Image: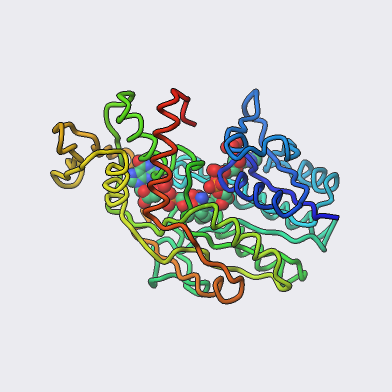
Amino acid sequence: MGKVALITGITGQDGAYLSRLLLDKGYTVHGTFRRTASSLNLWRMDELGIRDQVDYLPLEMTEFANIMRVVDRIQPDEIYNLAAQSFVHDSFEQPLYTSTVNGMAVVYFLEVIREQCPGVRLYQASSSELFGKAVATPQTETTPFYPRSPYAVAKLFAHWMVVNYREAYGLHASAGILFNHESPLRGLGFVTRKITAGLARIRLGRQEALELGNLEARRDWGYAGDFVEGIWRMVQQERPGDYVLATGRTHSVRELVTLAAACAGFDLAWEGDGVATRGIDRASGRTLVRINPALFRPTEVGEMTGDARLARAILGWTPRVTFEELVESMVKADLDRAGRGEIVN
Ligand code: NAP
Ligand code: F7E
């Protein structure tokens, strides 16, 4: 018989790709969603063609007893905790809620496993944001953490809880310290998808310009489809552990916009400095990109570069899709969607 997986945050980007991967491997997949809207938004599952292959359960991460009952009902072999308030920018406005969902809720899961089903394997979605104002480059599993947002502080609490439950109670609990990973299924609030969807709309005359914050921030951007493979491999190890997943290549937001613009058929020239910076389409002279100071963060993570050598050595994991291929695929997907007149999610 195949294994049973419980994925929290099934409606998110990683939930969709991980579901597809587990289904391909013969798992029975149960996915949890939160009942915030009147209907369940499964557009990502639709894009991957797997909507009807997953069992969906409502789960509120802030409700301990809800988690207890869902785990008891499903009796999973593996739990992948992906649900989170995952927007770093929003966490400055919602620090309490972010702390509860990203931090405390992880302890609820750990307690349920410890009390009810200690043999269950847990994956916790940790983040490169733990490194924050990084004290060394590139970042590895042993680089000290310096979180720079309520999001990162809450994830750090959860991360150490996972380590502690593993050491104190012998749970098979692993944390993936994942660097930014993107795809055509990325949420519109993140900078990659905001840029590719925005440029597609501009190309089709449906948006005037793109407003961005810090163009100089640098990230190690990989492809989500590659990263969920690494997540699964962590959970299959005989011994649980924590692993960095990253590409080791870093680009600035400015480089990202320039490349995405080229993929959308624009030749972008940059003029001005600071908040007066503008990205201008050389052919028409139109301003396509401008800066909105409201999009800057109170404390920013300037640069991230990951070193995934441990994952390569132990898990046999390497990312396959390059930054250029990733950006091109995202622009293409958004041009197709905008061309079909679809509401871009
Ligand atoms: P995502 O697309 O934003 O998905 C987050 C999921 O969490 C969504 O399904 C969301 O539901 C759910 N959620 C949020 N608040 C909830 C609550 N109170 N109760 C129940 N569910 C809730 O994020 P992702 O990119 O797939 O990332 C997956 C996980 O990896 C997250 O924990 C994220 O913090 C972490 N991570 C991501 C990256 C990355 O680059 N993608 C890197 C490192 C770590 P709705 O659909 O209802 O909003
Ligand atoms: O920002 C800058 C912004 O929101 C990337 C989450 O998945 O990865 C993600 O967090 C950079 C930042 O991702 C805009 O200031 C400029 O420096 O796409 P982002 P993030 O904050 O790195 C980590 C690993 C996670 O764990 C998180 O869950 O881009 N930036 N202008 C902008 N960012 C946004 N969102 N919007 C802008 O207009």
Q: Residue at x 38, y 40 (%)?
A: 331
Residue 6 higher or lower than 234, as above or below? above
**On the picture, is 42 further left or further right than 305?**
right
Determine the image quadrant of residue 287: top left
Residue 233 image offset from top left, x and y in percent: 65, 64
251 up-or-down from 97: above or below: below
Q: Decide: is 229 above or below 45.
A: below
Please name the residue shown 15% across and 38% down the image: 282
Residue 202 in the figure: left or right of residue 287: right
Disc tally is 0
Out of 246 and 98, give the one closest to the viewer: 246
Place of residue 291 in the rendered image (x, y in percent of width and height, measured from the top left): 25, 39
Query: What colour scheme governs how the chains and residues are painted in the rendered image of this protein?
Result: rainbow
Q: In the picture provided, is 60 more to the left or to the right than 300? A: right
The part of the image, by quadrant, that contains residue 166 is: bottom right
Tell me the quadrant of ligand 1: top right
Residue occupying the point 38% across, 64% down: 249
Q: Which quadrant would the N terminus be assigned to in this image?
A: bottom right
**Residue 261 in sight here:** yes
Say which quarter of the image contains residue 226.
Answer: bottom right
> Residue 33 in the image: x percent, y percent?
67, 37
Q: Is residue 71 left or right of residue 305?
A: right
Along the line of sight, the residue nearer the viewer: 28 or 252: 28
* Whether residue 296 can be seen here: no
| Picture coordinates of residue 156, whole percent (x, y) | 55, 60
Q: Residue at x 75, y 56 (%)?
A: 78
